[in-house]
Amino acid sequence: MIEVKDLVKTFDGFAALNGATLTVPKGAVYGLVGPNGAGKSTLLRHITGVYRQDSGQVLVNGVPVYENRHVKERVVSIPDDWFYYNQSTIREMAKLYAGMYPQFDWDRFEKLRELFQLPEKKAIRRMSKGMQRQAAFWITMSCLPEYLVLDEPVDGLDPVMRRQVWQVLLDDVAARGTTVLLSSHNLRELEDVCDHVGIMDKGKVLLERTLSDLQDNTVKLQVAYPTAQEPALPAELQILHHSQVGRVHTYIMRGSSEEICRRMQITNPVLLEAIPLTLEEIFIYELGGADDAAHKILL
Amino acid sequence: MLLTRSFCNRALLRSDLRRCWPLFAGYTFLWFLILPLRMWNDIPATLQAAYPDSARRTALEIIGSATQAATWIHLFFGLILAMALFSYLSGTRATYGMHSFPASRGCQFRTHVLCGVGCVAVSNVLICLLSAQSGGSHWGESLSWLVFSLVTFLLFFALGILCCMLCAWLPAMIVAYGTLNCVAILCRLLVDVMCGLFYPSYNDNVLSMSREHIVVWLTPVLRLRFGLTAMYGEGDAALLPASAWKSLLVYGIVAVVLLAVSWLLYRIRRSEASGDTLAFRPLRPVVRWIVGVLGGLGLGVALALILCCTSNTVGLLACIVALGLVCMIGTQMLIARTPRVFGKLWPELIALCAALIALCLCIKGDVFGFERRVPQASQVESVEVFSGAMTRGNTSLTTPEEIDAALQAQRYFVSRSDQEKEDAARYGQTVIFTYFLKNGGTLSRRYSLCSADLPQVKALTETDTFRRSMVLDAAEDISADNLRYGWVDIPEEEISRELTAQQSKDLYQAVLEDIAGMNMADPDLYRNQNCRVQIHLEDAVSDRDVAITLNLQCTRALALLQEWGIIQSPEDAFGAVDDDPDYVDTIEYPGITYPITTYAR
């Protein structure tokens, strides 16, 4: 489990992290979202042991990460700008990783060769951005990490390769219980792979929930009435959003789908239908109009 | 908390070797050219067989020159290798990548150092083995070269690493390296120039630094060079002289200390500092102020010298302040890596102006008491008084009475008015007092002396030692009975006459009588009388040579020379002098008067 408690980090007086708290359960795929400058990359660099925090704690399996070789052997990361020596090839970087990470698996490396199909002897710096990204995944996934920290992981990959990379990653989660923490701006993509989501802004984690919690507690209803006049709704319903087009009303409400539909029946609708909510919609309406951060990210 | 305890990381070591092998190969090849190949070339087997001594001398010469070259080669390779191994600290991507690996910072540091030192050591041992067996066997000299080579490399490598720790920006590393290595000599130069400008009695300069001077020690290239100069002075032995071994020992310890400091800095160095000009924030104002003050003073004085306004206090201050501001602004631009630095810097700029002006005025006003300082008699072990025109060399005064006389004379010089000092500086002779203090220190002051000052320094000029120094170059009393022989030369007339023991004794006795009877208040005595006669007497007991320079008051000695037919008349012993100005005029410029002196030729 990754635990971040009240993490504070300042750069030249600017608080990049201002009391961030986060928990990534073991075996989870945790998506971290937030606007630019929210502190996502800074948080991830603390978890990979690059930054030393000003205050707070960063624990992996209950042990501090910073300057701890034994913990860092279990955490492998792909930052947004992956490091490689300028003159090195994929093979040479793989050798470096193999020396650094004891669980590096050369069989896995050979298997992944078929997926990525990259020139092993070509200098990495001469490859395109997408190919460099693939090389990073190839080497990183060969390390068989217990914790995988990814910063904008599929940025630069084509749609086919994205799908394949996600598949390899999710297979690892299923087969070995790998814990994945990833940051992204793309909520639609996170929705497909994440089971936990956290939202960050101004150096704080504003909200973190499981995806199922969010989906079970928010309902989108499309309701049509005989007239354009909206009838009085039961007072106990929590309406997060309401819009109307002619006689058709759209409601976003907090609560379980069955319970809300049952209560709405008393308004005698011509049509009553519960529609699945996207992650994007859930965040928009769950955080509500009062929370600017969510709007900045999602709209 | 689990902490890593491994000494180095093998994967990182392999990676370092893979990256830096061209450097190591180049380094080894260079030494191969300088030592074994040259030996094979210059000392063929036939030479060894026919002339073993000559072959050995040639081999030692080659090793000696290689040892001298080692300082410069390692200055270059130490810097380059440190930069190559720690260059990742200059980029965020590389720094974050390296620091995310499961190896502690201490372990990474040790691995890089081990790679650099290990490879150079292997290369040097290889070269040493090849050299020792080339052109005959000379293990001692080859091992000396090996030790010298390793220590000098370690020193410059450690210095380079320290720069990499302090500066996370590649161009700044080079500046820091040069500054760290030469800052002492530059500061010393600045102090010399400043003191020369503001303190008329200042008597020292950067060229007078001894080889044991702290400034030389802080400039290893200079110190090691000095340490090796005696190499060829000890027969045909190319073994290092004692001074070089001493330097190596000191610099070896310094290198280890520098590495330890760098290791500590690396551990506390924040990853996010990569790419910054200075990796440690508290250093930023320190560097700004050091460069502002030293740059302002140094470059300001240089500008004032170019503009010929060093004697004008306002002009000098303007130059210093202007260049100080330029230096501080430039430094901040370098540190912040942006030209937009004025917003936050202006309070510091004002403070710098105030500090520079205050410092200069304090020096000018002798707030620190430099000009007024006259040591207590109880503090002084001995005094050396020197004036080229007055005495025949350094006159060493050791008795309490003589020391008191010198102190009294110096007090007089200190108490002179500015006008008197100016007049003396224009027309007088230079006199230098060097006090050797009981605490081991020295104090040296320089003044100008003109004839008007003679009555005031009578106590000094009337001392026996001072009297003797007007004629004799040996301060110690030499017995006339011990004189063995002597000779008299007049080079202009190609006259050279040897003196018998008796003649030497007679002449020496006459000189002593002349000295006792000299009128020390006569201003002519202190003029350059251009004595053409060179007299040397040899003391048989101490095996010393006494040189005598006669003046017009040495009537008895001159009479003897005339009696022996060496000179025709007393006046014949003296050539024409040209230190009397025939005509003195002045040219008036606004605010200043320049004297113009012409001489009869």
Image (cartoon, rainbow, N blue to C red):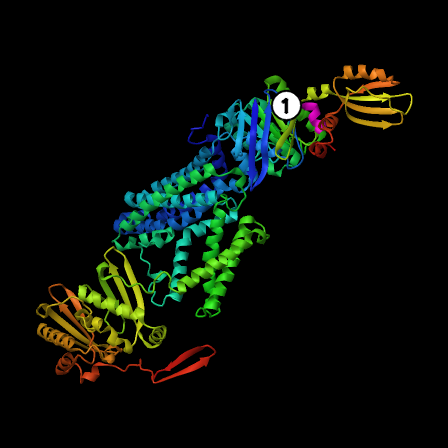
Question: Split into 4 quadrants, where in the image is the N terminus of chain A?
Answer: top right
Q: Is residue B80 above or below residue B564?
A: above
Q: Nearer the viewer, residue B587 or A213?
A: A213
Q: Is residue A193 magenta?
A: yes
Q: What stretch of residues is rendered in magenta?
A: A187-195
Residue A87 visible (yes or no): no
Residue B436 visible (yes or no): yes
Question: Split into 4 quadrants, where in the image is the C terminus of chain A?
Answer: top right
Q: Nearer the viewer, residue B385 or A130?
A: B385
Side (left or right) of A93 relative to B436: right
Q: Amino acid at mark 1?
A: Val
Query: x, y percentage for residue B535?
Result: 18, 74
Density class for disc 1 (Cα within 10 Å; few <14, some 14-19, many ≥20) is: many
Q: Is residue B325 above or below residue B447?
A: above
Outermost residue toward the right in this view: A227
Q: How many callouts does the rendering have?
A: 1
Q: Nearer the viewer, residue A133 or B595?
A: B595
* Chain at tag 1: A
> Secondary structure of the magenta portion, mostly?
helix
- The residue pinned by badge 1 equals A29
Side (left or right) of B50 relative to A265: left
Q: Is residue B587 above or below residue B65?
A: below
SS class, disc 1: strand
Q: Is residue B532 magenta?
A: no
Residue B161: quarter of image: top left
Query: x, y percentage for residue B2?
Result: 46, 25
Query: x, y percentage for residue B20?
Result: 48, 40
Query: x, y percentage for residue A43?
Result: 59, 32
